[in-house]
Image (cartoon, helix red, strand yellow):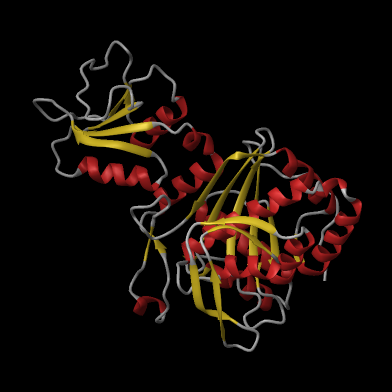
Amino acid sequence: MTRFLPFGDLVQDEAGRTNILFLGVAGETEEGGNLSDSILLASIDSQGPSVSFLSFPRDLFVSSQIGDRKINEIYAAARYKNGKNSQYGLKVIKDAVARFADIDVHYGVVVNFNVFEDLVDGLGGVDIFVQEDIVDPFYPDTNYGYQMFIVREGWQHFDGATALKYARSRKTTSDYNRAQRQQKVLMAIKNRAGEINLLTDLGKLKEMYRVFRDNVITDLGMTQIIALSKLAVSLDYTNAVHAVLNDDPAEKGGFLYTPAKEFFGGQFVLLPENLKDTQTFVSLVLKHPDIMLENAQLAVLNGSKIDGKAGETAARLRRMGLHVIEIGNYDSERPVFEHFVQDLKGGNKPLTTQFLEELFEARVLSPEEMVQEVDLVSPDGLVDLELVLGVN
């Protein structure tokens, strides 16, 4: 089976970003070993250089070239359908994610648990700050039963086996918590590789290559892997954007909901409440993270006289990862008809201003048009942009 494809330059989109889909699987020797235990899309800006990460829940129900199904089943089903052709499986899952998220997916990487453990052990373990205690009595053992897994809050040094358990445990937390932990483990691996100067240690590189050769399936060519390895050293991780698509409407990325099981053969699945907003969120995380990184502080004011409009809009923006710090009514004698944006800081948040203008088809007021007396509860100077909602 061809695991590493031959030579070629890194493919990029029109913005100069390269998007790589990572799938974590148990491997051939495990039951359901080709089901995707984790699904992570990474977007690398080689000009930044910077990187963004977005995790997808396993139960997300999407369309694919082999039919509508849970996203974690697509790679395995496509691979099996085409004579255990892993490259075909990659092609189908990349296409499914690309169409759902409305984003180019250039490459795919399938990593089984063996390479994960061996990689961490080869690095001498990784250091991770655990946010809260995990006590999981239902972690799978090697005999189709369960074992207890416990890890305590605080800084921990994990070997490969423990790092894998930390990344996979989910019975006593949630799929979304697990996705966040998986992203933390990836960053810890990156940090450890930098500490030991992995890319300059030929012995370590050869050892890592043997591990990857036997346990990784990808459509990245060898020269592309080398290019990515060198790029990884120069990436600015301090401003890396991390996000998880989820079903909590109070959280960033909370655009999903659970439909009635009877419509899906009794399965628990997740669907987007609003596909367009979900795709806008994906675009913010992976195509335009600079908007999030502006960290603009927003006020949303209701000028329409329609009850609840400001609250609904604020919740929508918060799910997109923007910071709404004030909600209220716009003081006017009659309803405002068009949405407009007031820039209270003289243009220091241009990307967020443009985003609001396009999302709401709002007019950005010139300095001469702005209402000078802005009645806000927040301390003076805290709000950067004020979105006033009209009837339209």
Q: Please name the residue shown 68% across and 39% down the image.
A: 235
Quadrant occupied by the N terminus: bottom right
- Residue 223 relative to residue 72: left or right: right
Q: Is residue 48 visible?
A: yes
The image quarter containing residue 240 is top right
Q: Residue furthest top?
A: 368
Dividing the image into 4 quarters, which one contains the C terminus?
top left
Which quarter of the picture shows residue 91? bottom right
- Measured as percent of width and height from the top left, residue 280 is found at 45, 45
Which residue is located at x 26 percent, y 30 percent? Answer: 378
Q: Is residue 99 left or right of residue 371?
A: right
| Nearer-the-camera pick, 365 or 130 | 130
Is residue 361 placed above or below 248 in the rendered structure? above
User: In which image quadrant can residue 181 be found?
Assistant: bottom right
Q: Residue at x 47, y 31 (%)?
A: 294
Please say if 240 is above or below 71. above
Furthest toward the left, the residue is 333
Residue 27 at x, y = what percent? 70, 75
Q: Give residue 151's position: percent from left, percent from top.
A: 55, 67
* Residue 217 visible in the displayed image: no
Q: Height in image: 219 above or below 338?
A: below
Return the residue nearer the eye: 176 or 67: 176
In the drawing, does residue 139 fall left or right of residue 207?
Answer: left
Q: Nearer the viewer, residue 159 or 247?
A: 159
Looking at the image, how many numbered discs can be counted on the residues?
0
